[in-house]
Image (cartoon, rainbow, N blue to C red):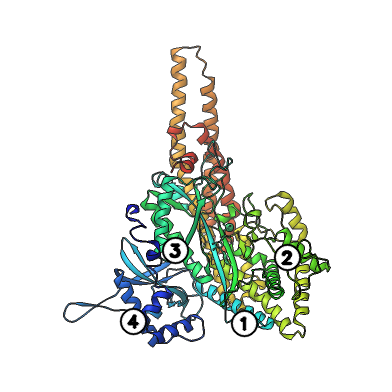
Amino acid sequence: MNDTIDYSAQPLHEIYGSNCFSDAEMRTRLPKSIYKEVKLVQEGKKALTLAVAEVVASSMKDWAIEKGATHYTHWFQPLTGSTAEKHDSFISPMADGKVMMEFSGKELIKGEPDASSFPSGGLRATFEARGYTAWDTTSPAFVREDNSGVTLCIPTAFVSYNGEALDKKVPLLRSMDALNSQALRVLAALGVEAGKVTPTIGPEQEYFLVREDLFEKRSDLMLSGRTVFGAMSAKGQEMDDHYFGSIKESAASFMKELNYELWKLGISAKTQHNEVAPNQFELAPIFDSANVATDRNQLVMASMIKIAKRHGLVALLHEKPFAGVNGSGKHNNWSMSTDTGLNLLEPGDSPQDNAQFLLFLVAVIKAVDVYSSILRATAANAGNDHRLGANEAPPAIISIFLGDQLENILQSLVDCKPIESACGEVLEIGRTSLPNLPKDLTDRNRTSPFAFTGNKFEFRMVPSSLSIAGPNTALNTAVAEILSGFADRLEKAADKNAEITAIVKETYKAHKKVIFNGNGYSEEWVEEAEKRGLPNIKSTIEALAVLESPESIKLFSKNGVFSKEELESRVEIYLEAYSMQINVEAKVMVEMAEKQIYAAAARYGRALSETILKAKEAVSSFNTSAYEKTLLKLSANVNGMMEKVEELKALIAKAGGEDEVAKAASIFRKEVFVKMGEVRGYGDALEEIIPKDEWPFPSYEDLLFRL
Ligand code: ADP
Ligand code: MG
């Protein structure tokens, strides 16, 4: 496959987006009037009519068939966190035994997948299994090529018969609407012309690559995505030599094909580099609107998994595949931009621009402070529990990094003091300019979970395997809520500049407790954060409970993003997912301990015993103390492990027997998960005792350093 990628024969600008039914493609293929209608529908200014859908469907079908497509699918994002689809072929048999290729407007707009097996958290009783998929006109359709052929994929929303959101897309779209309305109100009050405000997202995706042959020998990786045993290799990540080092050939060859596939889909994979841990990498695209970025991040993850296989590799998206080295996250870069091309978090050149910048900046600060627990909840999953608050990036405490310069500006404003450096005068919002701020502060503070990086915020708590829909739904809604309060004040104010100044000052003063520019990984910060009253929610089960709190229900229902029932359904589904994950990990641990480690220990024990007996038989004065010591250590650890395995089995049964979702999750967290740590302690000790060639599965050294 790689050999056929030749950009000199087929230049990149021709390949780029060729598998995406892009805006440009629509413009050339659709009659002008229809194209204009579609644009109005995309902008939310008009409802889609069946007549327009018919024309779009027909041209989409022609385009897809030219690409070799035989099937189409409504592509959607159920609450499992991955994507789902049901394929239908275009063929329609005719009386004469031939077929016609058909795809109607109705089929484009609406689908009815047999989706009763997707989790709905009680939203859709099983007797009312109907769920509908509805075309999302704002995210481009694409064709996907794989072994099953070429398929036209139509991004869709997934809703119940009663219109409740059964997926991740619907709430995200609703949150984008909420943000749009409130941001437009603020802009209108400031006298800034704009027709639309869209949240923009650039998700940087971290992942590991391991060799497929080694992966297949590890049932823990295969079944649960992470290693439940594994003694640290002699070398870990302490030398930092992998980070930004040259990319290994096999990984490079994988990346070449990944880029090719993504570029064809019109996904701008822009940078790729090694990450901190050995065999860990990152891919960063250019940002898109929140909705498109979310769809594309799902495609990036799916493409990584698919293409790695073609290179004899496996892409691991789990947050913590290996203990003792860094895990993976997603750096969710977030900003807001107008249809006139204005980035609302970009400090401007003129006093007026700066007033607007400071207003939106403090809106985000307030939103993150007030709704920090909700944001934290949207970054919760079983994998992330190994990262957040577990001595690794970033802590479970939400704080904001602003940088000293910006913090000084805001503080001076509050104190009515002259602004340091550039201007040296007292800042009057709307009248004086801000000193030039350095752009892109990204790498100045890598320990902050929510960092301002020059013209956007980077939410770094997001787990690597999770859809970014949830975190961004929360972020958009929280900021919309704060902006609505600002708009209420600004719309009434006679002197706008004075009101902006008052809002910026008051908001900063009230919420600066969430700002922290220091080392977020330090123990001192944990203490300091506690003094400041910032929540430190350590585990998924505690975090998820926040989503159904009165505060959360009020925020999301007021902004039309989630109803109470929709929130409750999510909590139930995510808690169940948590329990299922730990259950699989625990069961695979039992299997590996009993069937692999125990057996290897028994073999080695016998070998040692025979050695001791034979040595003494041969030479009665033979000093066998080293063998004896090893044998004793071996038996102590085997006995210890097997005892703990029995206890673990009992706990798995206990958790499995609990019917109430929240209670079961709590047993999995507080008992099963904790017991797994004890089993692992013995297992890893045995790995250090038993000779490498007798150890029943690949070691950390194999997994992390061979590629
Ligand atoms: P780094 O964080 O590695 O220094 P950049 O700051 O250039 O790299 O960009 C990181 C990510 O942020 C990229 O995916 C980029 O597209 C995205 N990004 C840049 N500007 C914005 C914006 N206005 N809104 C959302 N994401 C953005
Ligand atoms: Mg970054």
Residue identifier under label 3: 299
Q: Position of residue 79 (x, y in %)?
A: 49, 67
Q: Can residue 465 be seen in this view?
A: yes
- Image marks 1 and 2: residues in contact by CB distance under 8 Å: no
Residue at disc 1, CB closer than 8 Å to ligand 1: no
Q: Nearer the viewer, residue 542 or 656?
A: 542
What is the crowding at mark 3: few (fewer than 14 residues within 10 Å), some, or many (at least 20)? some
What separation in Å lies between label 4 and label 2 (alpha carbons)? 57 Å
Residue identifier under label 4: 104
Front: mark 1 or 2? 2
Q: What element carries label 4?
A: loop
Residue identifier under label 1: 193
Q: Where the N terminus falls, by quadrant?
A: bottom left
Q: Which of marks 4 and 1 is nearer the N terminus?
A: 4
Q: In which quarter of the image is ligand 2?
A: bottom right
What is the crowding at mark 2: few (fewer than 14 residues within 10 Å), some, or many (at least 20)? some
Label annotation for residue 23: none
Q: Where is residue 20 in the image (x, y as percent from the top left)?
A: 40, 69
- 381 lies left or right of 616: right
Residue placed at 54% from the left, 72% from the top?
172
Residue identifier under label 2: 435
Image-quadrant location for residue 115: bottom left
Q: Where the C terminus falls, by quadrant?
A: top left
Q: Where is residue 354 in the image (x, y as percent from the top left)?
A: 70, 72
What separation in Å lies between label 2 and label 3 (alpha carbons)? 41 Å
Q: Which amino acid does label 4 sit on?
A: Ser
Looking at the image, residue 580 lies above or below residue 503: above
